[in-house]
Image (cartoon, rainbow, N blue to C red):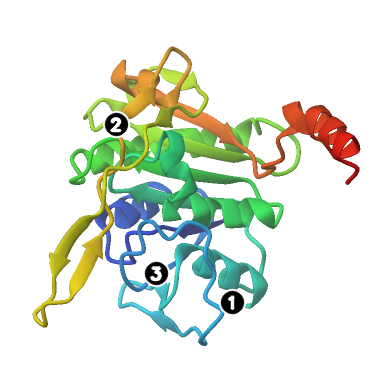
Amino acid sequence: MRILIANDDGYLAPGLAALVKACEGLGEIDVVAPEQNASGTSNSLTLHRPLSVFTAANGFRYINGTPSDCVHVALTGLLEHQPDLVLSGINNGANMGDDTLYSGTVAAAMEGFLFGIPAIAFSQVEKGWGQVDAAARFARSLVEQVIAHPPAPGAWLLNVNIPNRPDAIELPRRITRLGRRHASEPVVCQQNPRGEPIYWIGPAGDVREAGEGTDFHATADGCVSITPLQVDLTDHARLPAWRQWSQAVGA
């Protein structure tokens, strides 16, 4: 078993170290992570400059790019052998609902999935790395289970959110769907030293769909949320209506 581990909080993040340590003994592990915190970079690839690969004292390799860069470079030239599994995390804070669209943690796992490799993104529900070792023990238990009993043939992608609790490995697990948030809060406008306006992206919007079956509901109920994801963004349900519209307008 070969496992590639990445993240979006950077190669020095406690969550990455905890996940790597927890997975020791499961197989050959390669770590390729961003040089700096790259939260919120989604699936972006760096195309306007070359990327450099460095090796830290602990053997982790890190890249001056995005989480997707790290997995992409690893899979297309850096590693001698393709991994059997791609893991990402453990992220400092939740990646649920609409947050998954922006998440570098989810994007790193998704990059592996796009290359046909099963992948899991791990996040803690609350920021601050509280009980991160417990979350890592849960992550290992889930990895052991998917290795022993693959959930589906071919590649698959899981988004996992773990409550910050010392008994994380004992918590119930729920297979969930993504919830939804309200629109983000307004940007925060300030002035730089020259008196020019600068803008900070505002906080995420409040949860607006957190009913039973969603990731928000599961974690609020003290459970681990496991959400299977896919990449197909096609609005299949409305395809017939769009075809009718196209015919009606003569397009």
Contact between marks 2 and 3 (CB within 8 A): the answer is: no
Instruction: Using the rendered view, name the quadrant where residue 73 is placed.
Output: bottom right
Mark 1: few, some, or many residues within 10 Å (few <14, many ≥20)?
A: some
Q: How far across and how far down the image is residue 62, in percent?
A: 41, 74
Q: As displayed, is residue 174 above or below residue 124?
A: above
Marking on residue 34: 3
Q: Nearer the viewer, residue 120 or 56?
A: 120
Q: How far across and how far down the image is residue 202, in percent?
A: 25, 50
Residue at 38% over, 73% down = 59
Q: As displayed, is residue 237 above or below residue 5?
A: above
Residue at 31% over, 65% down = 37
Ranked by sequence position, the earlier of labels 3 and 1 is 3
Q: Nearer the viewer, residue 24 or 161?
A: 161
- Amino acid at dot 2: Asp
Q: CA distance from mark 2 to mark 3?
A: 29 Å
- Amino acid at dot 3: Pro
Indicate the secondary structure of the residue bearing disc 2: loop
Residue 2 in sight here: no
- Depth check, mark 1 against mark 2: the one in front is 2
- Relative to residue 239, is residue 28 drawn left or right? left
Q: Which residue is mark 2?
A: 206
Ranked by sequence position, the earlier of labels 1 and 2 is 1
Indicate the secondary structure of the residue bearing disc 3: strand
- Amino acid at dot 1: Leu
Residue at 27% over, 36% down = 134
Q: How far across and how far down the image is residue 148, in percent?
A: 61, 33
- Depth check, mark 3 against mark 1: the one in front is 3
Q: CA distance from mark 3 to mark 1?
A: 14 Å
Instruction: Using the rendered view, name the quadrant where residue 130 is placed.
Output: top left
- Relative to residue 232, is residue 189 drawn left or right? left
